Image (cartoon, rainbow, N blue to C red):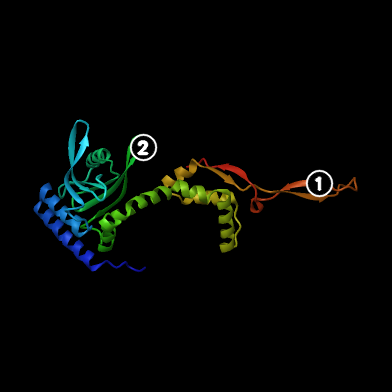
């Protein structure tokens, strides 16, 4: 496995940020001190211009009043691209903190939330359906994770990535690459035929379509298995073929139908998975 190289400038920025956070932790610093360090990281690790892209104590209009989030990343639009909710170093990130940030995001029309205490970082997406749904996409630890992983994560939420729309693309791909969508394609009639052909080609063993469905179900995790259990799976049906036979009491040929085995299947039949 080839280990990804980290840009020397990014490596130095990560080491500097780690040192700052270790000092914060040792001093048990308050939220104001944590905020100052995180603001420096927004520039050094993520490439945001603190005067153009970062709004401190960003005002969020709500019913009858205004709230203020710790930071907002604002690019070309006046609407924040990312809401950043910050807690003091050493304070565990909790659901109530995310709930607070989600309220800010909803009122600001923002889809992205970063929740951090300077060492722990979480990235969340807010979906606007009939009710708000918050999805945690990633998390990492500045003091525990290796430099390669940290570089990837901070680049993911950095200026270049966000300005190109990479976060939005990542969310779209996540919605496409669901267990439901992938299983639907794998286990349609053509998908099953293709799997059966490739298995025969690779192993020289012929299996039935039912056996493939059962095998896929066995290797799924609990969430994907639940998706599969709700699916109606259509199997290629067994062909019928005519064979001419000659009755003992007649010189005329008689047509008789036979049903082929699953190994000769080509048409359509229906099979519904009910097991979880």
Secondary structure at numbered mark 1: strand
> Which residue is at 63% across, 46% downward?
268
Residue 232: quarter of image? top right
Disc 1 to disc 2, C-alpha distance: 60 Å
Please tell me the numbered disc located at residue 129: 2
Q: Does dot 2 land on a helix, a strand or a loop?
A: loop
Q: Given the current orientation, which residue lies at the most extreme left position? A: 27
- Nearer the viewer's eye, disc 1 or disc 2? 2
Residue at image coords 28%, 41%: 109
On screen, 117 above or below 8? Answer: above
Quadrant (top left/top right/bottom left/bottom right) for the N terminus? bottom left
Residue 158 visible, this orientation: no
Residue closer to the observer: 235 or 41? 41
Left or right for 121, reference 220:
left
In this rendered view, identify the residue nearer to me: 162 or 150: 162
> Residue sitting at 58 percent across and 45 percent down?
234
Tell whether 69 sits left or right of 135: left
Mark 1: few/some/many CA within 10 Å (<14, 14-19, 20+): few
**Residue 187 visible somewhere in the drawing:** yes
Disc tally is 2
Q: Position of residue 56 (x, y in %)?
A: 16, 47
Q: Which residue does the numbered mark 1 point to in the structure image?
A: 255
| Left or right: 171 in relation to 49 | right
Residue 272: name its quadrant. Answer: top right
Mark positioned earlier in the residue sequence (1 or 2): 2
Residue 51 disc label: none
Q: As drawn, which residue projects farthest toward the top?
A: 64
Q: Residue at 39% of width from left, 49% of height from top?
A: 172
Q: Position of residue 265 (x, y in %)?
A: 65, 51
Q: Nearer the viewer, residue 155 or 138?
A: 155
């Amino acid at each position: 496995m080839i280990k990804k190289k980290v840009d020397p400038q990014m490596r130095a920025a990560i080491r500097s940020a780690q040192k700052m956070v270790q000092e914060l932790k040792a001093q048990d610093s308050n939220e104001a001190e944590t905020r100052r360090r995180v603001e420096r990281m927004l520039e050094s690790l993520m490439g945001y211009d603190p005067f153009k892209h970062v709004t401190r104590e960003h005002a969020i209009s709500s019913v009858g009043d205004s709230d203020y989030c710790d930071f907002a990343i604002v690019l070309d639009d006046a609407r924040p691209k990312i809401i950043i909710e910050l807690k003091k170093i050493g304070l565990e990130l909790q659901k109530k903190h995310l709930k607070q940030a989600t309220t800010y995001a909803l009122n600001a029309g923002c889809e992205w939330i970063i929740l951090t205490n300077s060492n722990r970082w979480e990235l969340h997406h807010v979906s606007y359906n009939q009710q708000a749904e918050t999805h945690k996409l990633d998390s990492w630890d500045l003091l525990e994770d290796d430099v390669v992983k940290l570089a990837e994560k901070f680049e993911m939420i950095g200026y270049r990535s966000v300005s190109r729309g990479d976060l939005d693309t990542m969310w779209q791909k996540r919605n496409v690459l669901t267990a439901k969508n992938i299983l639907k394609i794998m286990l349609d009639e053509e998908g099953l035929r293709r799997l059966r052909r490739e298995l025969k080609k690779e192993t020289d063993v012929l299996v039935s379509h039912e056996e493939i469905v059962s095998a896929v179900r066995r290797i799924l995790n609990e969430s994907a298995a639940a998706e599969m259990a709700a699916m109606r799976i259509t199997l290629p049906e067994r062909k019928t073929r005519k064979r001419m036979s000659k009755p003992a009491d007649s010189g005329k040929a008689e047509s008789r139908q036979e049903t082929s085995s699953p190994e000769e299947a080509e048409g359509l039949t229906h099979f519904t998975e009910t097991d979880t």
